Amino acid sequence: MPVSNMKNLVSYLTDDGGEADIVIQFKIDGAKRRMITGQVHATVSMQCQRCLEAIRLEIKDEIKLALLESEDHIKSLPRHLDPWVCEGDRLSLLELVQEQLILCLPIVAIHVTGKCNANTNYRSENERIESDINVAEQQSNPFAVLKQLKNKFID
Ligand SMILES: [Zn+2]
Protein backbone atom coordinates (compact mmCIF):
# COMPACT_ATOMS: atom_id res chain seq x y z
CA MET A 1 0.00 0.00 0.00
CA PRO A 2 1.46 3.43 -0.89
CA VAL A 3 2.30 5.47 2.22
CA SER A 4 0.64 8.45 0.49
CA ASN A 5 -2.75 6.68 0.90
CA MET A 6 -2.46 6.95 4.67
CA LYS A 7 -3.03 10.63 5.38
CA ASN A 8 -2.96 10.32 9.18
CA LEU A 9 0.37 8.49 9.06
CA VAL A 10 1.79 11.04 6.60
CA SER A 11 0.93 13.85 9.06
CA TYR A 12 3.76 12.50 11.30
CA LEU A 13 6.27 12.23 8.42
CA THR A 14 8.44 14.58 6.36
CA ASP A 15 7.23 13.08 3.05
CA ASP A 16 4.68 10.57 1.73
CA GLY A 17 7.06 8.52 -0.45
CA GLY A 18 7.46 4.74 -0.28
CA GLU A 19 5.18 1.81 0.31
CA ALA A 20 4.07 -0.25 3.28
CA ASP A 21 4.34 -4.04 3.07
CA ILE A 22 1.34 -5.65 4.67
CA VAL A 23 0.59 -9.30 5.30
CA ILE A 24 -2.78 -9.98 6.89
CA GLN A 25 -4.58 -13.17 7.87
CA PHE A 26 -8.19 -13.46 8.96
CA LYS A 27 -9.24 -16.33 11.16
CA ILE A 28 -11.37 -17.50 14.04
CA ASP A 29 -9.43 -18.70 17.08
CA GLY A 30 -10.21 -21.51 19.53
CA ALA A 31 -12.29 -19.16 21.68
CA LYS A 32 -14.36 -18.25 18.60
CA ARG A 33 -12.88 -14.76 18.42
CA ARG A 34 -12.60 -13.11 15.01
CA MET A 35 -8.87 -12.45 14.64
CA ILE A 36 -6.68 -10.38 12.35
CA THR A 37 -3.01 -11.33 12.49
CA GLY A 38 -0.02 -10.48 10.33
CA GLN A 39 2.87 -8.04 9.86
CA VAL A 40 3.22 -4.43 8.76
CA HIS A 41 6.49 -2.99 7.53
CA ALA A 42 7.45 0.38 6.01
CA THR A 43 10.42 2.71 5.63
CA VAL A 44 9.44 6.31 6.38
CA SER A 45 11.08 9.66 7.18
CA MET A 46 10.47 11.73 10.30
CA GLN A 47 11.99 15.05 11.31
CA CYS A 48 14.92 14.91 13.75
CA GLN A 49 13.96 17.02 16.76
CA ARG A 50 17.57 18.16 17.22
CA CYS A 51 18.75 19.18 13.72
CA LEU A 52 15.32 19.28 11.97
CA GLU A 53 16.66 17.18 9.06
CA ALA A 54 14.88 14.00 7.92
CA ILE A 55 15.64 10.62 9.52
CA ARG A 56 14.91 7.38 7.66
CA LEU A 57 13.16 4.93 9.95
CA GLU A 58 12.24 1.31 9.41
CA ILE A 59 9.01 0.56 11.23
CA LYS A 60 7.52 -2.88 11.58
CA ASP A 61 5.18 -4.71 13.88
CA GLU A 62 3.32 -7.95 14.41
CA ILE A 63 -0.44 -7.55 14.37
CA LYS A 64 -2.55 -9.62 16.72
CA LEU A 65 -5.96 -8.05 16.85
CA ALA A 66 -9.24 -9.44 18.09
CA LEU A 67 -12.30 -7.88 16.47
CA LEU A 68 -14.77 -6.62 19.05
CA GLU A 69 -18.28 -5.34 18.49
CA SER A 70 -17.99 -2.73 21.23
CA GLU A 71 -15.49 -1.32 23.73
CA ASP A 72 -17.39 -3.14 26.52
CA HIS A 73 -15.65 -6.36 25.49
CA ILE A 74 -12.08 -4.97 25.79
CA LYS A 75 -11.82 -5.94 29.49
CA SER A 76 -12.53 -9.61 28.77
CA LEU A 77 -9.71 -9.86 26.20
CA PRO A 78 -6.52 -11.79 27.09
CA ARG A 79 -3.44 -9.59 27.46
CA HIS A 80 -1.60 -10.94 24.42
CA LEU A 81 -4.36 -9.71 22.09
CA ASP A 82 -5.02 -6.11 21.09
CA PRO A 83 -8.60 -5.01 20.60
CA TRP A 84 -9.97 -3.60 17.35
CA VAL A 85 -13.50 -2.31 17.77
CA CYS A 86 -15.51 -2.85 14.63
CA GLU A 87 -19.11 -1.72 14.76
CA GLY A 88 -21.27 -3.30 12.10
CA ASP A 89 -20.02 -5.80 9.54
CA ARG A 90 -17.62 -3.60 7.58
CA LEU A 91 -13.99 -2.95 8.43
CA SER A 92 -11.61 -0.35 7.04
CA LEU A 93 -8.39 -2.24 6.41
CA LEU A 94 -6.67 1.02 5.49
CA GLU A 95 -7.57 2.54 8.86
CA LEU A 96 -6.46 -0.58 10.70
CA VAL A 97 -3.08 -0.84 8.97
CA GLN A 98 -2.48 2.88 9.27
CA GLU A 99 -3.19 2.80 13.00
CA GLN A 100 -0.74 -0.08 13.50
CA LEU A 101 2.00 1.80 11.61
CA ILE A 102 1.40 5.00 13.62
CA LEU A 103 1.80 2.96 16.83
CA CYS A 104 5.29 1.91 15.59
CA LEU A 105 6.52 5.51 15.26
CA PRO A 106 8.83 6.85 17.97
CA ILE A 107 7.31 9.62 20.11
CA VAL A 108 10.37 11.77 19.44
CA ALA A 109 12.72 11.08 16.50
CA ILE A 110 16.40 11.98 17.02
CA HIS A 111 19.42 10.91 14.92
CA VAL A 112 21.93 8.62 16.61
CA THR A 113 25.10 10.40 17.84
CA GLY A 114 27.49 11.09 14.98
CA LYS A 115 24.75 11.13 12.34
CA CYS A 116 22.97 14.24 13.54
CA ASN A 117 23.78 17.46 11.71
CA ALA A 118 23.22 19.42 14.91
CA ASN A 119 26.19 17.68 16.59
CA THR A 120 28.90 20.04 15.34
CA ASN A 121 26.85 23.14 16.13
CA TYR A 122 26.07 21.76 19.55
CA ARG A 123 29.74 21.13 20.33
CA SER A 124 30.94 24.55 19.16
CA GLU A 125 28.20 26.14 21.26
CA ASN A 126 29.52 24.20 24.28
CA GLU A 127 33.10 25.23 23.57
CA ARG A 128 32.04 28.82 23.29
CA ILE A 129 30.33 28.67 26.67
CA GLU A 130 33.40 26.97 28.15
CA SER A 131 35.77 29.65 26.88
CA ASP A 132 33.42 32.33 28.23
CA ILE A 133 33.60 30.65 31.64
CA ASN A 134 37.41 30.60 31.51
CA VAL A 135 37.52 34.32 30.81
CA ALA A 136 35.08 34.98 33.65
CA GLU A 137 37.13 32.83 36.05
CA GLN A 138 40.36 34.59 35.19
CA GLN A 139 38.76 37.95 35.77
CA SER A 140 37.26 37.01 39.10
CA ASN A 141 40.20 34.96 40.42
CA PRO A 142 41.44 36.85 43.53
CA PHE A 143 44.88 35.24 43.19
CA ALA A 144 45.31 36.90 39.83
CA VAL A 145 45.38 40.21 41.72
CA LEU A 146 47.91 38.86 44.27
CA LYS A 147 50.08 37.62 41.44
CA GLN A 148 50.10 41.08 39.96
CA LEU A 149 51.06 42.58 43.34
CA LYS A 150 53.80 39.97 43.86
CA ASN A 151 55.20 40.73 40.46
CA LYS A 152 55.25 44.40 41.37
CA PHE A 153 57.24 43.71 44.56
CA ILE A 154 59.80 41.65 42.70
CA ASP A 155 60.23 44.39 40.17
ZN1 LIG B 1 19.52 15.17 13.65
Image (tube, rainbow, N blue to C red):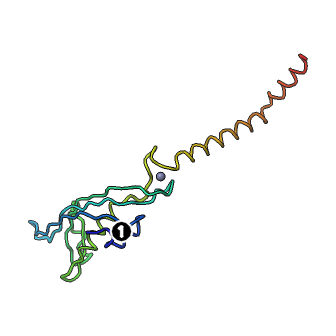
List x then y, in percent, for residue 25.
14, 66
Q: Closer to the camera, 99 or 7? A: 7
Pointer 1 residue: 9
List x then y, in percent, for residue 50.
51, 54
Q: Is residue 95 left or right of residue 139?
A: left
Task: Confirm or reject: label 1 Cβ below 8 Å from ligand 1.
Answer: no
Choose top left, top right, bottom left or bottom right for residue 150. top right
Above or below, comparing residue 37 to residue 138 in the picture: below
Choose top left, top right, bottom left or bottom right for residue 35. bottom left
Which residue type carries mark 1?
Leu
List x then y, in percent, for residue 2.
28, 69
Q: Secondary structure at mark 1?
A: helix
Above or below, comparing residue 111 to residue 30 in the picture: above
Q: Around disc 1, counting alpha carbons within 10 Å, would you say few (fewer than 14), some (14 to 19), or many (20 or more)?
A: many
Q: Is residue 46 left or right of residue 134?
A: left
Quadrant that contains the C terminus: top right
Above or below, comparing residue 36 to residue 130 in the picture: below
In the displayed image of the protein, which residue is found farthest to the top? 154
List x then y, in percent, for residue 49.
49, 57
Q: Is residue 126 left or right of residue 145?
A: left
In the displayed image of the protein, which residue is found farthest to the bottom? 88
In the displayed image of the protein, which residue is found farthest to the front? 17
Q: Residue at x 32, y 55 (%)?
A: 58
